[in-house]
Structures are given as structure tokens and as C-alpha cells.
Amino acid sequence: MAVLTKKKKKHNPHCLLSWWDNFNGLYLMVSLIVLYYMAYRKLEKNERSPQQNGVTETDSREEQISTYFDEKIPVPENVTQVFSFRKLWAFTGPGFLMSIAYLDPGNIESDLQSGAKAGFKLLWVLLGATIIGLLLQRLAARLGVVTGMHLAEVCNRQYPTVPRIILWLMVEFAIIGSDMQEVIGCAIAFNLLSVGRIPLWAGVLITIIDTFVFLFLDKYGLRKLEAFFGFLITIMALSFGYEYVQVAPDQAEVLKGMFVPYCKGCGPVQLEQAVGIVGAVIMPHNIYLHSALVKSRDIDRHNKKEVKEANKYFFIESSVALFVSFLINVFVVAVFAEAFYGKTNMEQCNKTGSAHTDLFPLNNETLQVDIYKGGVVLGCFFGPAALYIWAIGILAAGQSSTMTGTYSGQFVMEGFLNLRWSRFARVLLTRSIAIFPTLLVAVFQDVQHLTGMNDFLNVLQSMQLPFALIPILTFTSLASIMNDFANGLMWKIGGGVTILLVCAINMYFVVVYVTALNSTLLYVLSAFLSIAYLCFIGYLVWHCLIALGVSCLDVGGRVRNPSAIFIEEQPEFDS
């Protein structure tokens, strides 16, 4: 009986936090303490350098306003039409790079679990989360276009040193967590494609090499880099679209689940999955990424008409890109909803005589799937081609997300710290931090522990959402920064309610996760961390409320006064 109990505990899907997760959490905390020390020393050095070198503060700031891409894509001129496909093509690129974050392995796993646990009933949640993501990406793009600076650079100018470093660390936390999910996805894809000949630990190591190879793609031009990302999105669309056609889900049920906001017969499991969808879709570092990518277009910010036009075309392009990503996510949800919702372990590969019968216990419990098991059961029921095509789609998702995570990290580091690292050094830092715990799990544990790390990483990224959403609403609402392009009353109210809703949903996800720890020590540690976490969010909310018009909170005019914290010079427009 003792042996049976121990085995059941090992494979219990509700046991979210193993000692590996504790190790990962402590490891990441130590890593961030080291990063904090490095950042603080760097900022101290930067503050002394202007006086020592005879460089003025203005010169230092001008040096900071730089883009990661040296190339600027020209925009066609002398186009008189209200809408021009030539101009739309010129602005096409940043939105599709941004949309890759909506297709990373963490999102794919959230999709397949949503389908397997709730059928088609949560498709409306996916649609709503994607629309919310589009509105937030619109704010990020407008900030980059209007100010000529991305969100990290604006935060550098707005916040004092200590809050600025804390904010940078929280975003780095999210990037490293996302990087770990991408490593896991790629390692599983290599294992599936090689029929187990490439072990998981070897797949983890392969992701180091291929990431550095892809880093040199932008040497061939920004347009070619964007085309490569478009190619990866096409691979995902074809791969998961093939699975969708093979399974042939009920189209009426798909449309009903997408447009009827109701979940009949749903319980705590489906509620947690709905919260997980929102947390997986809206990524904090993606806000920083998009605000930087739009700087790659050659726009005259002195010309108000050009800025307004750029905002329009970037919004159209982002809408198309997120529509494509939404369809790909729907493919995954629908496949697992049609084929595996309500199914038991006995109905899966145990029945077909597969070599993977050890993954599915001989019982009638509800089937539990993940990225790895998802490929296996597809192969069992729809042939080996379905397994290999699934693995190709996961590999494309992991590789493309790895590249966008690299660019996000570069923008964030340059913006917050004014620290320009080479791409090689940047990838070496974050990828090393991400790979070490992942490699340990791959070597000493099995694939179920490796895929189970996604629960911990999803919670980690959910906690970082306020550190992107609150600043972007704050700065896009300030007329001292955005001038005539500042958020109107409806956008302020709608943005505030949306961000409050998203943060509340993700906090619920975190609370559910923490209550499953079953450890007094971890409860106490979580309580202390929660107090510090909420205090810092309160500080950001204080700034945000003043930007939204609650001027009574601005004691002494420290926030709204441009000479104190916020940007000293007005945006460059001819009024």
C-alpha cells in the first residue's frame, strides 16, 4: 500500500509544486540578486561617468535613445489614398514578431489542456484574452511611435533608481521563465522527432547551439529576419492546421464555444484553466518588445500626420497578426477538445497497443495531457504523421519564441540600464540561467516532471504582468509624454478596468497555486514576498492613478511635474 501511495503521489497532476520547483524558485531568486548587484554597480558607474568624462546629461540621454536594429525600413511617400497596401506592407513585420509570443510552447500547452479539460467551452475566454492583448499591444506601439522610445527607455526616465532596477528584475524574471518554457518545448520536440533517440537532456543542449545560429540572421537585413519569423508562423499554421483537418472537430461546437460566453457544467478545474489561458496569452515582456520593434520604421516624428498614419497601420498589422495567432490557438484547442475531452486513460494508447503505454495508467481516470503526451496520443489515433507534424509545430513555436525572448531581453537591458551588450553575451546570460535547472530535471527526472515545470513558470509570468501593464497605461495617459496622442477618457477607463481585471485573474491563479504548497515554511515565505510585491505594485498604481487624472494623490506635484520625474522635453511635434 505504501508503494502504491507513493507512486500515486508522484504522478498526481494536482501536486503542482515539487522540490524541483522549490529549487527553481530559489535558483531564480539568487540569479536575480546577482543581476541586481550588477545593475546597481552599472548605474552607479553611469551616474559618475558624465561628470568624469565631461559629457552632459543631455548627451547621455541622446546616446540612450537608440534602437537595436541599425536598419530603418523606409515608408512610401506621396500616397494619397486613405488606405494603401504599399504602406501597410512597409509597416508589416513588428506585429508578426510580437504575435509569436502568443504561440510559444506555454500557450500551446495551455490550449491543449483547455481542450482536454473543458472541450470547446473556453474558446470565448481565448478570444477575449486575445482581444485584450491586442488593445494592450496598441498602447505599446503608440508609445514607441509617438515618443521614439520603447517602454524600458521611458521607464528609465520616469522612475527613480531603485524602483527602476526592481522593475527591470521583474521583467527579466518573466523573460527567463519564458525562455525555460521554450527550452522545454524544443527539447520535447527533438525527442518526439527522433522517436526517443535524442534524450531530453541532449535536446536541452541542442537549443543552445541553434539559438546562436539564428542570432546571425538579422545580419542579412531586417526584412529577411521578419520573413524568417513569418516562415516559422506558417509552419505552425500548417502543422496545427493539419491536425485540425485530421481530427475534423464539429464546426458548430467550435463557433458556439467561441461566441457564447458560458461554460455549462464547469467546476474549479475549468475555472483554473480559464485563468491559465489569460495568463498564458498576455505576456509581460511582449509589451516591452512591441514598443521597441515599431522603432524600426523610418517615421518623421516632427510630422503629426505621419505619426497618426503610423499608429493606424501598426494597429491594422497587429490585428491581422493576432488573428492568425488566434486561429492557430483555436486549432490546438479544437483538436484536443474533439479527440480527447472526457476520455480516460484506458481509451488512449493502452487500447491501441502503442509503445507509450507506460505514460497512461491502466485505470479509468480522466486523461491528463501535456505537450509530450499530446503528440503521443495524436500519433496513436491518427498515425505517425500526426505525431511528427505535431513535433514540428512545437519546434517552430519554441525556436521563434526563443528569438523574440532574446530581442526582448536586449531591449529591456538597454532601456533600463543603458547597457548595450552584444547579442552573444545577452543570450549566453539568459540562456545559461534558463538551461541549468531545466537540464537538471531532464537528466535526473522524466518528461512528466519536465512538462510539469510549465505550471510553475506560468505562475511566475502571471505575477510579472502588472510590471508591464501598469507602466504602459501610465505613460500613454500622460499628455506630457504623448501630447495630442495621450489616451482619452474612454481609453483611460477601459484600460484601467482591463488591467485591473487581468491582474485580478492572474492573482487568483497565483493564490490557487500557493494554497497547494502544503508547507508552513512556504506559506510564511510567500506571505513576506506578497507584502513586498503588493507594496511595489501600490507604488506603480499611485503613479498610474495620477496619470489617469486623480491629481489629489500627487502631493507636492512630484509626479505630474515634468521637471521632477517625468520627461523634461515635450514630444517633437509641430503643433
Image (cartoon, grey):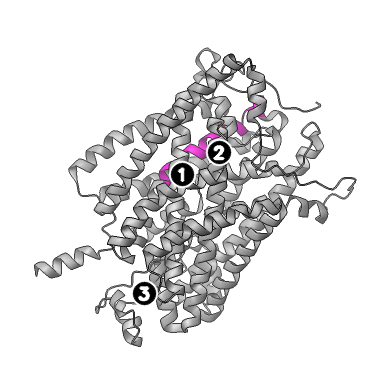
Instruction: Return the residue at label 1.
Output: 429
Instruction: Inspect the image, locate mark 1, and give the three-letter code of the amino acid beneath it.
Output: Leu
Residue 109 in view of the camera: no
Q: Is residue 227 left or right of residue 78?
A: left
Predominant SS of the magenta segment: helix
Q: Which mark is residue 342?
A: 3
**Mark 2 secondary-structure assignment:** loop
Q: Earlier in the sequence, mark 2 or mark 3?
A: 3
The answer to whether residue 149 is magenta is no
Residue 95 to residue 309: above or below: below
Please tell me whether mark 2 or mark 3 is closer to you in this view.
2
Q: Please tell me which residue is depicted at 36% across the width and 74% down the height of the picture.
A: 342
Residue 431 to residue 564: above or below: below
The image position of residue 428, as x and y in percent, is: 48, 47
Q: Please tell me which residue is depicted at 67% across the width and 39% down the height of the picture.
A: 142
Instruction: Inspect the image, locate mark 2, and give the three-letter code of the amino acid beneath it.
Output: Trp
> What quarter of the picture does the C terminus occupy?
top right
The image position of residue 421, as x and y in percent, is: 55, 38
**Mark 1 secondary-structure assignment:** helix
State the extent of the magenta-drawn residues as a range: 461-481
Instruction: Return the residue at label 2.
Output: 421
**Mark 3 secondary-structure assignment:** loop
User: Hey, which residue is sitting farthest left in the picture?
Assistant: 1
* Quarter holding residue 487: top right
